[in-house]
Image (spheres, helix red, strand yellow):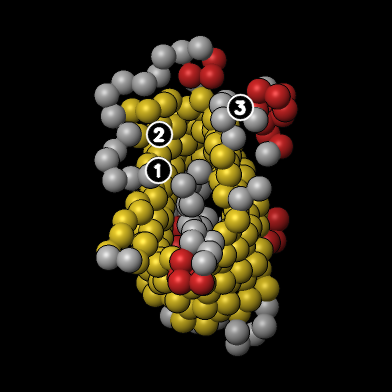
Amino acid sequence: MFRAGMPRLLPTIRCHLAPALTALLFCGPAAALDNFFNVTALTLQQGDGFEVGDSRRQIATLEHYSLWNWGDVYFFYDRIREDESGRYAYYGEFSPRLSLAALGMDTSAGPIRDVLLATTVERGSGGFKAHLVGPGLTWKVPVFAHLETNLYYRDTRGLDGETWQFTAAWVLPFATGPLRWQFDGYLDVRGAEGDAASDWNLNPQLKVDVGAAFGLPGHVFAGVEYYHWHNKFGIEGVDERVLSPLLQCRFSL
């Protein structure tokens, strides 16, 4: 979200992989490892056509998703370089969710797999800070490996008042002949906050498993990302639409 004094470069990429130290705070090491699953990825991409800051930039993203018996954790960190000026910006989010089922509640009903308490901490260059908390849902939907929605109360430092944010994230794997694909991404929709207008940010990625051709299935992906941010940083009338090639490497602990 835009605010006075905020750097012109902040988040430009976030791909949810399938959303661990936080586990130790809730359950301790033994319980946290019961249902442990994790994947970590490094994504490199270059895009041209950005409206805020330099038009062309390079982005390196480190992200992680892990699933525990108490809930899940997703975090990412962006390092962004503007080509023309050579300036760098940084942005990250840390998003643990606590499952109500872990507290003994029966939360599975129909297409709902689980109900969670969702939280997010955002940090960026220039002292940008935001805190989010609210209810989250994980869904049981055919063909999707992961589908979640979160409805947050949002408080951004430097902006008067508070607002709401809706976030959806998905992972949809599929195959065409011998090729294995993954379509994933997220959607953020935010209300107006202070002098920042309401905005939405859609960020899908389509990737093919190129590692399978070299005996490393599930580890190396290549593809494209479509990046569309309406009213970027809450600036009325600023829309960014960028199509970027990407290369992604994954591993599990």
First of labels 2, 1 by sequence position: 2
Q: Residue at x 38, y 44 (%)?
A: 145
Whether residues under marks 2 and 1 lie with C-beta atoms below 8 angstroms apart, the answer is yes
Residue topped by disc 2: 138
As helix, strand or loop, the secondary structure at mark 2 comes to strand
**Rendering quarter of residue 119:** top right
Label 2 amino acid? Thr
Which residue is more in the foreground, 226 or 139?
Answer: 139
Pinpoint residue 171: horizontal percent, then vertical percent.
Answer: 39, 50
* Above or below 5: residue 52: below
As helix, strand or loop, the secondary structure at mark 1 comes to strand
* Above or below 83: residue 115: above
Determine the CA span between mark 2 and mark 1.
Answer: 8 Å
Whether residues under marks 1 and 3 lie with C-beta atoms below 8 angstroms apart, the answer is no
Pinpoint residue 178: horizontal percent, then vertical percent.
Answer: 32, 66
Q: Farthest residue in the bottom direction?
A: 84
As helix, strand or loop, the secondary structure at mark 3 comes to loop
Pinpoint residue 140: horizontal percent, then vertical percent.
Answer: 32, 34
Q: Point out which mark residue 16 bears.
A: none
Label 3 amino acid? Asp
**Rendering quarter of residue 168:** top left
Determine the CA span between mark 3 and mark 2.
Answer: 19 Å
Camera-side mark, 3 or 2? 3
What is the number of callouts on the image?
3
Label 1 amino acid? His
Q: Residue at x 51, y 72 (%)?
A: 214
Left or right: 26 with respect to 203?
right
Q: Point out which mark residue 146 bears.
A: 1
First of labels 3, 2 by sequence position: 3
Which residue is more in the foreground, 238 or 224?
Answer: 224
